[in-house]
Amino acid sequence: MNKTLKKISLLGILSIFTLSAVTQPVFADDIPFFSSNDVLYYSEKGCTVQNQSGDIAVVGNDNAEKIFKFLTSASFKGTGDKPFNAVQAAGALGNFQQESGMDPGAIEGGAPNSYPGDGHGLAQWSYNVSGGARVSEGRRGILFELAKSEGKEWSDLSLQLKMIQNELNDVGSTEGSRLLNDFPEFATVSDPAKASYLFMQSYERAGTPVQEKRDSAAKAYYEKFKNLAPDPASTSASTSGGACTGGGSGLTAFMGSDFTIYNQCQYPPYGGSWGTTLNTLGQTACSTACGPTSLAMAVKNMTGQNITPKETIEYYNQQKLWKEGGSWVEGLNSGADHWGLRTESFDTKDINAYKSVFDKGGLVIVAGYGASPFMSQGHYILIRGITDEGKFRIGDPGQGVNTNGTPEKPLDWDTAPIVSNSVAAGSVAIYKK
């Protein structure tokens, strides 16, 4: 064990990717490298969201995407024991946009008991009013009771998705039968604006609907998310099992081919090579920047900000986050906070800890050394989720990318060598704030 690795074991902190012997990045078309390291390539299955033990999985980059994926993966009595299709889900989103701006903490009038009806949450569930006076707790009361029974805040997004699920399944309400029986056109609607109107009439029943705003939002959400809906012919959704079949626990919103992968040495669409950029220790980005590159992948894919390794390397330089040997975990914590994300520690030796992160819509940046995909003197990788086959899907800063920023080939890796060679003190789970 060399001096660097002794320091890792003693301090529990990883110095990353000092390539004393390796001078070139590893690219995805390096067939001998991949075959010798047991890399498998992914076959897309169109699986997006999974419900866990009665809880609703909230997977996506923002609330609108999370709601869309929930609606298109769970089955409801109100839609004939089927998930919403993309048009129907967009119609619902148009309503939630008008009601709450997609904010599960929204309160009608801005404060409790400040406005007739006092709507709460995504759908602005209200108490019942007659003659200007409250006559019953209504749907708002049902929301509060559900929160109490679940031990959650009423403003929790997953709780409100369960509220929607219950209502569309006629649990404590008649919303599902109303949608199914009174508005059968919803089953075959092909226009997002029409779906918005039908959902308003059946589910929201708004006093002042401002329907044109609902319809406009529905059209916009349809265009934004229409390709995210699972193919009904290839998925088997249920209210308890989600849209995934097989052993895919831990699937996230970040498994698809549209995930942006960065290489720490060169990425032409963003200004050529930054691999020769020097950090504050006089080391090149190509030899030390796997941490900032993994962070850039997380920021780009979780927030949509056009952040590349160029920006994260510059941030590390400005904040003096480089240490002997390369990048350390302090840079991930600081950089995530800077770009609107948050980090948490987790037990990298427990596969269930990874699954828990992915099920909550998070990503994992893991430090390790030894067996591939880690380097002998340390390397950071980003883990995107777990496939149906039980493999980690990874974003490796040493992985080749196409000119449009997508990985040359998605990398699926056995979990065992990553788990066993990981270093918890250098690793983080990363979430949106």
Image (tube, rainbow, N blue to C red):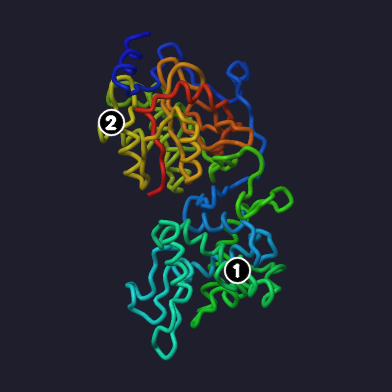
Could you give the CA–CA distance between mark 2 and mark 1, rounded to whole angstroms? 54 Å
- What secondary structure is found at the residue carrying circle 2? loop
Which residue is located at x 54 percent, y 43 percent? 252
Viewer-proximal residue among 63 and 183: 183
Q: Name the residue tied to disc 1.
A: 170
* In this view, the mark in front (2 or 1): 1
Is the residue 288 above or below the residue 54 in the image?
Answer: above
Q: Name the residue tied to disc 2.
A: 321
Is the residue 401 above or below the residue 192 in the image?
Answer: above
Give residue 193's position: percent from left, percent from top: 61, 71
Give residue 403's position: percent from left, percent from top: 56, 36
Which residue is located at x 46 percent, y 30 percent? 350
Viewer-proximal residue among 111 and 269: 111
Total marks shown come to 2
- What secondary structure is found at the residue carrying circle 1? loop
Q: Give the mark nearest the N terminus, 2 or 1.
A: 1
Give residue 22's position: percent from left, percent from top: 46, 14
Are the residues tagged 2 and 1 within 8 Å (C-beta)? no
Is the residue 230 above or below the residue 273 in the image?
Answer: below
Residue 200 shows which numbered tag?
none
Q: Residues within 10 Å of mark 1 (few under 14, many from 20)?
A: some
Which residue is located at x 35 percent, y 41 percent? 336
Task: Give the residue type at disc 2.
Answer: Leu
Give residue 301's position: percent from left, percent from top: 48, 44
Residue at the far right: name it. Answer: 233
Residue at the far bottom: name it. Answer: 131
